[in-house]
Image: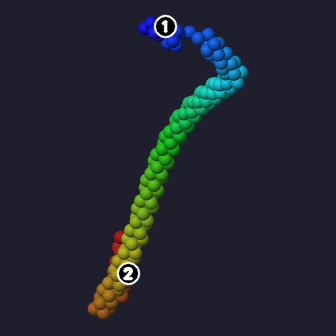
Amino acid sequence: MTLLLAGGGGILSFNGGFAIWVLITMILFLWIMGKYAVPLIMDSLEERESRIKDSLESAEKALSRAEKLSKDNEKALREAERKAQQIRKEAIEDAEMLRAERIEKSKEEAAQLISQAKETIEQEKKRALMELRDEVVHLAMQSASKIIDAELDTRKNSELVDNFIEDVSKN
């Protein structure tokens, strides 16, 4: 260890000229760094800080726009649901009204068919009565002609035929 301290250039030995050169180069290095490198580094850091700040602001704006869009979408969805419910309600009301109209129309048609059927029955009844009267008159005439042939008393026969026709007319 004595060898190291003795001036033979050991680790702990001090060389003044070398220390001055180290001091000068260090001052020169710090001055060059301070003059040229540090401002560039600071500018880069400030620019990066500015970009980060802008990015954060953009992200906040995008977030607020997204929240606004979300609220608008929720509002639009609620409005669409309300309109859909209203359309469903109107469709149900229209269907009920259409059903009621069809029922009423069916009732009217049924009443009309019943009325027509009654009218047809009445006409058929009248026609049948007319046919029956014609048949009765025809039978009466045949009977009368047989009676006339058998009895040649015209006065009695006329009374019989007239009475018979009166009876038939009353029915």
Residue for point 45% across, 60% down: 109
Residue 154 located left or right of residue 67: left
Residue 2's image quarter? top left
Q: Is residue 160 above or below residue 76?
A: below
Q: In this view, does 149 lie above or below 6?
A: below
Residue lying at the far bottom in this picture: please name it. Answer: 149
Residue for point 70% across, 24% down: 36
Residue lying at the far right in this picture: please name it. Answer: 35
Residue 95 on image: x %, y % = 46, 49
Residue 69's image quarter? top right
Residue 42 on image: x %, y % = 66, 23
Amino acid type of disc 2? Answer: Asp
Circle 2: element type: helix
The quadrant the N terminus occupies is top left
Question: Which residue was labeled with disc 2?
Answer: 134
Depth-wise, is mark 2 or mark 1 nearer the camera? Answer: 1
Circle 1: element type: helix
Q: Is residue 161 above or below residue 55?
A: below
Question: Which residue was labeled with disc 1?
Answer: 5
Within 10 Å of the Cα at label 1, are there few (<14), some (14-19), or many (20+) other Cα atoms? few
Within 10 Å of the Cα at label 2, are there few (<14), some (14-19), or many (20+) other Cα atoms? few
- For the residues labelled 2 and 1, the Cα–Cα distance comes to 169 Å
Residue 72 located left or right of residue 33: left
Residue 161's image quarter? bottom left
